[in-house]
Image: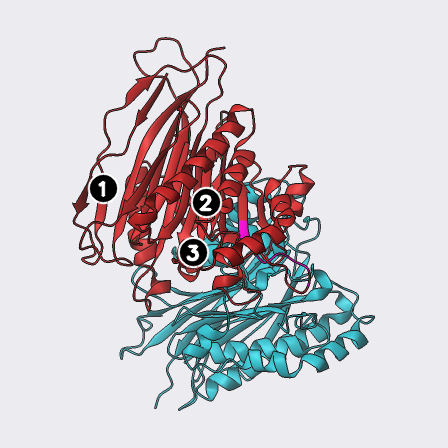
Chain colours: A red, B cyan
């Protein structure tokens, strides 16, 4: 049985800081569904950037997110772990002509890839960044004999990507949609996170962007002795803002407190918009998708005990809009959504936050 | 008047974890000195790496630290702010043939400097990393019209450094002493931190080391609304260990609690050696120097109120040894020390911690 609480209307909350507008989700009552025998469970949440998504292209953005969700769920249903599923989602997100991610992929003169992307595996706590221009190499993954599809994909499709980029340059009128990302939880409760951002188009040559920096672009951490919840986070937005606040890790830490919604809202208000490290900025622009899960006892009405995974998922942004998609392995199709700041709210000074809850039960076998 | 508590004997403490040996400083009674009229106050603490320092070269290591302290104090006495003083110390530390820092300075094929170094200014919270191969550029400093001597120094002396490196390659038998760093507090209570590590010699081409990564190599943060203390931290050791634990920032956060010594010891035990992100490592190798200061009320016996700056300084390491030096602007000369793990303690699994306290009073003018 799955119960999922969906997204619904938003309301504007008065905030501690007069400059901050908080938008709170009112969660609807969950629906119940029948879990199919033998099918694996899992959940994926993706984003196609925090920035500005025009209404005229809304359909395309949503379509990208939908396909990425489906790819991740296919992987999970085939028995893949969270890291493989999150990688599959990332590749799909990068592949779209409607996102700039991966488009800046380029070999520098040392023969290295300058595209910024990273993946974190919550179980091993391994962090792999694509391209050698980062503190971490893919070696950490390879040592563990984990096949990292992304690396191969980027390397193989390099020329193709460059060609496509050139042909798309005029089509792509929005430079802000350069980051994509995904977070996944698999049947065993392992979490993983991934992020990829535009390459050379938007950066100084050789600059390592937030997507490849530890703690900034993505974070995933399975439950442990000091962490009651498994958490996975992927960010988007202004690179310098995300780095100076080490936002992905900050969100992950905050999500260890009881109320996930409140924890994320406070983090976005106090540690992001209100960060002393960004005090001189006119506006603080970014967005996050987060997922946290914990094993919990079965519903009171169920007498026999079953392993149940409670998944809470949220997105929050200070940008005009953020495009997200999410899907449970039991769902027939992905849900997509473009979250927008309410009318009158000022980007860079306001926070929107939405999310839902999903309960995953192991299939009867 | 200055009162300084010096370093004295160490004793081995039983620790929470059986693998961890804590070495605690017993602080001697402070001596009192007369502050000279018109002279500016300030304090500097430097390190010439955490690793292994042979007895045969102890004199040279100490000499490097001594000179670096003197350069920083000269700057402070000339009216420089903490960031300029910390930069002066760093250049002096890099200049020695007995440290490898800066020796790996090299232009890559894009014409960028691959040497890893960074400076953080506690007042503006600006972070500048040398070389373009990092998430931050020197532009942040230049925008603020702050002259960053290090950048010019590195660029100007590049060829000279490369030549010296080649001639020193056989002399330098220890590859572990590749990182140097400094922390400073100036008369106004501003703090700054700096770190520089070896370049290409010890890394993959293009890899950004911990010294240039935000939160890993150094951290400085003036007192603010949520931070009762000003803190400055500089790290050394195994790059991957320092990055995975974001050690400099972690220490800075921990130092906001009352007992600085206990806070640093617990951080080294629980967040460094005991970090889940390094669970697969045989040993966790690193060292930190930290400084924290706060304005405090005058001594009870002094009736007139004077602005007094209480400076607590500590170093802690899990490596065999760590070479440090420190100096107050009122001191005629720097004190230097090679801290070593006690006999029987296992490097990578044990923590040594030592430090002192220094009270700075504004000169009578």
Dot 3: chain letter: A
- Marks 3 and 2 sit apart, C-alpha to C-alpha, by 22 Å
How dense is the environment of label 1, judged by Cα within 10 Å: few (below 14), some, or many (20 and up)?
Answer: many
Residue A91 is left or right of residue B203, and the answer is left
Dot in front, 2 or 1: 2
Magenta highlight range: A110-117
Residue under pointer 3: A171
The residue positioned 46% from the left and 15% from the top of the image is A363
Q: Looking at this view, is B26 or A113 the one in front?
A: A113
Dot 2: chain letter: A
Residue under pointer 1: A24
Residue A214 is left or right of residue B305, and the answer is right
Query: SS at mark 1?
Result: strand
| Quadrant in which residue B324 is drawn | bottom right
Q: In this view, does A264 lie above or below B94?
A: above
Q: Is residue A190 visible?
A: yes
Q: Which image quarter is the N terminus of chain B in? A: bottom left
């Amino acid at each position: 049985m799955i119960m999922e609480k969906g997204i619904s209307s938003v309301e504007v909350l008065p905030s501690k800081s007069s400059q901050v507008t908080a938008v709170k989700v009112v969660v609807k009552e969950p629906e119940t569904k029948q879990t199919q025998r033998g099918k694996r469970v899992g959940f994926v949440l993706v984003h196609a950037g925090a920035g500005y998504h025009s209404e005229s292209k809304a359909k395309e953005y949503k379509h990208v997110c939908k396909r990425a969700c489906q790819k991740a769920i296919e992987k999970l249903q085939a028995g893949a772990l969270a890291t493989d599923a999150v990688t599959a989602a990332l590749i799909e997100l990068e592949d779209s002509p409607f996102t700039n991610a991966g488009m800046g992929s380029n070999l520098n003169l040392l023969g290295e890839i300058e595209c910024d992307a990273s993946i974190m595996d919550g179980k091993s706590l391994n962090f792999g960044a694509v391209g050698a221009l980062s503190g971490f190499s893919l070696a950490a993954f390879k040592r563990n004999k984990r096949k990292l599809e992304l690396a191969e994909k980027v390397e193989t499709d390099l020329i193709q990507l460059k060609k496509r980029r050139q042909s798309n340059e005029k089509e792509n009128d929005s430079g802000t949609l350069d980051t994509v990302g995904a977070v996944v939880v698999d049947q065993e409760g392992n979490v993983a996170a991934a992020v990829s951002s535009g390459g050379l188009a938007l950066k100084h040559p050789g600059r390592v962007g937030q997507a490849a920096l530890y703690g900034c672009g993505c974070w995933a951490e399975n439950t442990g002795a000091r962490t009651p919840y498994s958490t996975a986070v992927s960010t988007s937005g202004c690179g310098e803002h995300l780095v100076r606040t080490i936002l992905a890790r900050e969100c992950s830490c905050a999500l260890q407190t009881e109320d996930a919604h409140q924890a994320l809202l406070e983090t976005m208000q106090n540690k992001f918009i209100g960060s002393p490290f960004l005090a001189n900025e006119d506006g603080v622009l970014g967005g996050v998708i987060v997922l946290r899960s914990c094993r919990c006892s079965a519903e009171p009405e169920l007498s026999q005990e079953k392993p149940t995974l409670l998944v809470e998922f949220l997105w929050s942004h200070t940008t005009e809009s953020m495009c997200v998609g999410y899907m449970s392995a039991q769902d027939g199709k992905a849900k997509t959504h473009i979250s927008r700041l309410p009318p009158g709210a000022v980007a860079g000074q306001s926070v929107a936050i939405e999310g839902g809850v999903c309960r995953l039960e192991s299939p009867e076998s």
